[in-house]
DNA sequence: ATACATTAGATGTTAATACATATATTTGAA
DNA sequence: TTCAAATATATGTATTAACATCTAATGTAT
């Protein structure tokens, strides 16, 4: 549905504002749908993001700050996300011997299993969203990079 | 900066995933900057959104559900947002005489004054973000509509 | 008119976010 | 060496989000 209908706004001040609102709206729209997929598995989109970062490093460990750097939404606290995932045994945690300030965080087999289940669900969700061509998808991504400057 | 550098990811599974991550990242990026602008004025981006909806209706009132319908991010609770704005005297609130379940919410002069101050700040922020042409901005918005299906 | 469903809004509760600050460790300069 | 600065992570706290549930008012069918 068109943004104008979604939020019942007849028009916007200018194309830039229209685009900005649409980015925020679409992100919220995605977030809500991701939440619904992840909820039965007991994790949040943020925790999912951390698990995927850790799978990207596996079998190596990652420090909390490496995780933080790679998070899509930096507003939340990587330390506490790791704590939540640790409580559910999706990650392991031990202080790094070379630098005892750091913590080596590694995804567990249970975490990897969870992700492989979730991959399927997420791919199904993505598949339902292919109203754009690959070129259009790339164009959007390129323009968003350009937008942020 | 390119998304790949922002979140230190060398590549993505496919263009759709790259676009999705970029939408989420860009929205978070915008949200953080909006928060910083709004903080000195004591309101959140969600409350700002509600005030703008109410200005759009002014001098008419709006019901809480009308506000909810028009919010960019529907996840939060319109009733509580109105409560917060009421506590700061940015909105007035009284039960609707025609339907006593409803509440007539109207922006106050203080609220309008706040918005006119904020308009300046927000416009300055937007102005620093014109790396795209008007056409590109419109294209992104159109493609996001198409993306959501 | 009565009873049941529906709608509008408020509220309770748990968890997550935003922001500041604290603690421990390492680095580096005097 | 010694001590201040920098770094990595954790924690404290107030606010907000997420989700369910509740109450009051209205609509509707019989």
Image (spheres, coloured by chain):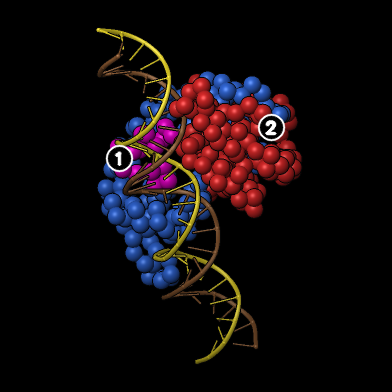
Chain colours: A red, B blue, C yellow, D brown
Place residue B143 in its image quadrant. Answer: top right
- Residue shown at the point (69%, 32%) measured from the top left: B16
Is A114 in front, or is B143?
A114
Residue B41's tag is: 1
Q: Is residue B88 above or below residue A103?
A: below
**In the image, is A16 to the left or to the right of B108?**
right
Chain containing the residue with disc 1:
B
Magenta stretch holds residue B112: no
Magenta stretch holds residue B40: yes
Image quadrant occupied by the C terminus of chain B: top right
Q: SS class of the residue under badge 2?
A: helix
Q: Is residue A47 something that shows in the picture?
A: yes
Residue B2's tag is: none
**In the image, is B96 to the left or to the right of B15?**
left
x, y percentage for residue D24? 41, 75
Q: Is residue C4 above or below residue B103?
A: below
Q: Is residue C10 above or below residue B106?
A: below
- Residue shown at the point (39%, 50%) measured from the top left: B54
Q: SS class of the residue under badge 1?
A: helix
Is A32 in front, or is B59?
A32
- Residue shown at the point (49%, 33%) measured from the top left: A74
In this picture, which residue range is highlighted in magenta?
Answer: B31-48
Place residue A30 in its image quadrant. Answer: top right
- Residue shown at the point (66%, 23%) measured from the top left: B11
x, y percentage for residue A7? 53, 48
User: According to the image, label 2 marks what residue?
Assistant: B16
x, y percentage for residue B103? 39, 64
Work out whether mark 1 precedes mark 2 in sequence or the reverse, and give the earlier one. 2
Q: What separation in Å lies between label 1 and label 2 (alpha carbons)?
A: 38 Å
């Amino acid at each position: 549905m068109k943004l104008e209908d979604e939020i019942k706004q007849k028009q916007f001040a200018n194309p830039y504002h229209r685009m900005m609102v649409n980015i925020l709206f679409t992100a919220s729209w995605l977030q809500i749908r991701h939440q619904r997929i992840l909820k039965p598995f007991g994790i949040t989109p943020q925790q999912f993001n951390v698990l995927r970062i850790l799978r990207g490093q596996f079998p190596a460990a990652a420090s909390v700050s490496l995780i933080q750097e790679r998070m899509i939404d930096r507003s939340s606290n990587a330390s506490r996300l790791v704590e939540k995932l640790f409580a559910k045994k999706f990650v392991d945690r031990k202080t790094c011997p070379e630098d005892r300030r750091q913590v080596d965080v590694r995804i567990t087999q249970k975490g990897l299993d969870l992700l492989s289940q979730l991959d399927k669900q997420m791919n199904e969700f993505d598949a339902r969203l292919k109203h754009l061509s690959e070129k259009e998808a790339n164009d959007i991504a390129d323009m968003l990079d350009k937008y942020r400057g």
